[in-house]
Image: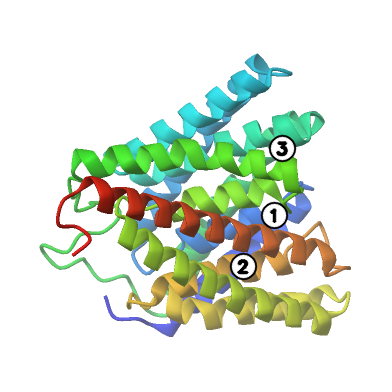
Amino acid sequence: MRFDVRHSLITGASCWVAATLAFFLHCESPWWAVISAWIVSGPDLHASAFRAGLRVLGTLAGYGVGYSVAHLAAGDPFAQVIGMALVGAIGTYQRFRSRYSYAWIIGCITAQILIVLAITDPSSVYRTAHYRLYEIISGVVAVTLCQRLLVPLLGFETSPVPAGQSTESSPGFVPVARRKLLTAAFVGGLLPVAIMVLWSRFSLPSPVQIVVTALATIDHDVASAQVKAAQRLLGCLTGGALGCLTVFLSSNSFAIWSLFLVGGIVILSRLHLGGGRWSYVGTQGGVAYIVTLVTGNHAPESILPLVNRLAGMISGVLLLSAACYVVRLWEERTTPGLAS
């Protein structure tokens, strides 16, 4: 599907509406609402609706699993580690095995957020779980409203998908070799545990953001994961730098902040929605831009929390890259001819 700048305008409007809804509901982490709008919005209305449904269902399932593990394993580090490893391994395995991959990764991430908080800040588990559903629904509602209103207003309709071309509403499911599935599941289960061990020893910044970033970047192939990690790192640096610059320029004016939010989203969505080989840089750049620009229920007042979240994102990418390197060495030792 050919890129149209009007899709960028719809995405920018969706993100602004999502932020406004999250502010109105006094959500604890309004950036999740805007990220939901950013990820769900796209040129194909049917694919967007399908992805929105999977995001809500995955969030609900992750809420149930994560809250149950956090409650049952409260105060027991060994049980918390086992719960975190099982959620990460099963979620990652099903992500690359199921046709509903997106729901599995969202569910896995949501559950891990609650488990990590049960370790780092137990008093915030219920509050975070309570508001996360509001945040996700705010993003989904914003995209639905903006697409339904602005698509006819801007004078175009989405084109049907050509025969043989897959979309997220009719995904072209590609089976993954069992060995790769098990390797990815092993990394998905072990990496969150390793991150929490490192956090306890070295006080890593924003452990929730590190775990989320690492899980979202895992791929079923080590080489693909390394490329994805490199693009994610580039996106973090690009979007984060743009977001930090915007924070300095936007002052405390909601109107000016709104213009910067929509403008930045429109610019980054050109790469995000373009569908080229660098589209993932735009996707992650948008996420980084959002987490720096959307903080509490007002325009950002300090750059320190923004830097902390960005450091968490970058740490997650670097730790995943290190895990991929170790897996690559192991594969070269156990698979004849791979090294050559």
The image shows residue 278 at horizontal and vertical percentages of 39, 77
The single residue placed furthest to the left in the displayed view is 163
| Circle on res. 21 | 1
- The mark found on residue 199 in the picture is none
Q: Which of marks 1 and 2 is nearer the N terminus?
A: 1
3D distance between C-alphas at marks 2 and 3: 21 Å
Q: Position of residue 119 (x, y in %)?
A: 72, 31
Label 1 and label 3: CA atoms lie apart by 17 Å
Give the x, y percent position of residue 218. 42, 52
Q: In which quarter of the image is the C terminus?
A: bottom left
Q: Which quadrant does the N terminus fall into?
A: bottom left
Q: What residue type is labelled 1?
A: Leu
The crowding category of the residue bearing disc 2, from other C-alpha atoms within 10 Å (few below 14, some 14 to 19, many at least 20), is many
Amino acid carrying mark 2 in the image: Ala
- Image: 220 above or below 90: below
Q: What residue type is labelled 3?
A: Thr
Q: In the structure shown, which secondary structural element does the residue marked by tag 2 occupy?
A: helix
Q: Which of marks 2 and 3 is nearer the N terminus?
A: 3
Which numbered disc covers residue 288? 2
